[in-house]
Amino acid sequence: MAILFCGIVMSHYTHFNLSTVTQITMQQTMRTLAFIAETCVFAYLGLALFSFKHRVEPALVVWSIVLCLVGRACNIFPLAVLCNRFREHQITRKMMFIMWFSG
């Protein structure tokens, strides 16, 4: 926790004490390192997929898809109607359906 807090505080103060070129260089370096770390995590997860034998349960697949669609519908449609009360440019039913189905 101390290292995390130190990093947050130091990023707030040290960023503005660097030159403009160094600020840009450090931002690009950190983005590159974050991309590499994310790629390594996804590659590791992808390779772990082949490390054990899988058993496919069609009922689980079907129920998962159905419940995901129902859960999205329970969020998208009421929230879109609520947003329409405070918006000048309304969300149409067609747009709500596209947001629901596309996830």
Image: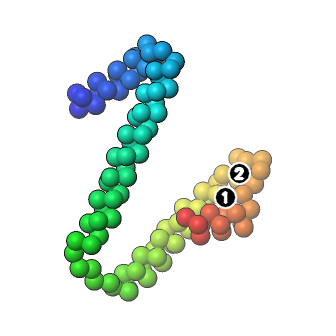
Q: How far across and how far down the image is residue 42, in percent?
A: 35, 57
Which residue has dot 2 on it?
85
User: Up-down: is 83 above or below 68?
Assistant: above
Task: Using the image as rendered, state which of residue 68 and residue 80 is in the foreground.
Answer: 68
Task: Using the image as rendered, state which of residue 18 and residue 58 is in the foreground.
Answer: 18
Q: How far across and how far down the image is residue 99, in percent?
A: 62, 63
User: Up-down: is 78 above or below 16?
Assistant: below
In the figure, is residue 77 to the left or right of 86?
left
Q: How far across and how far down the image is residue 6, in percent?
A: 28, 24
Rendered image: mark on residue 8: none
Rendered image: mark on residue 81: 1
Q: Residue at x 54, y 61 (%)?
A: 75
In the rendered structure, are the residues bearing label 1 and label 2 in contact, judged by CB atoms less than 8 Å apart?
yes
Q: Residue at x 41, y 45 (%)?
A: 35
Instruction: Give, as a three-letter code, the residue at label 2.
Output: Arg
Judged from the image, the secondary structure of the residue bearing numbered disc 2 is: helix
Q: Quadrant of residue 54?
A: bottom left
Q: How far across and how far down the image is residue 52, in percent?
A: 21, 75
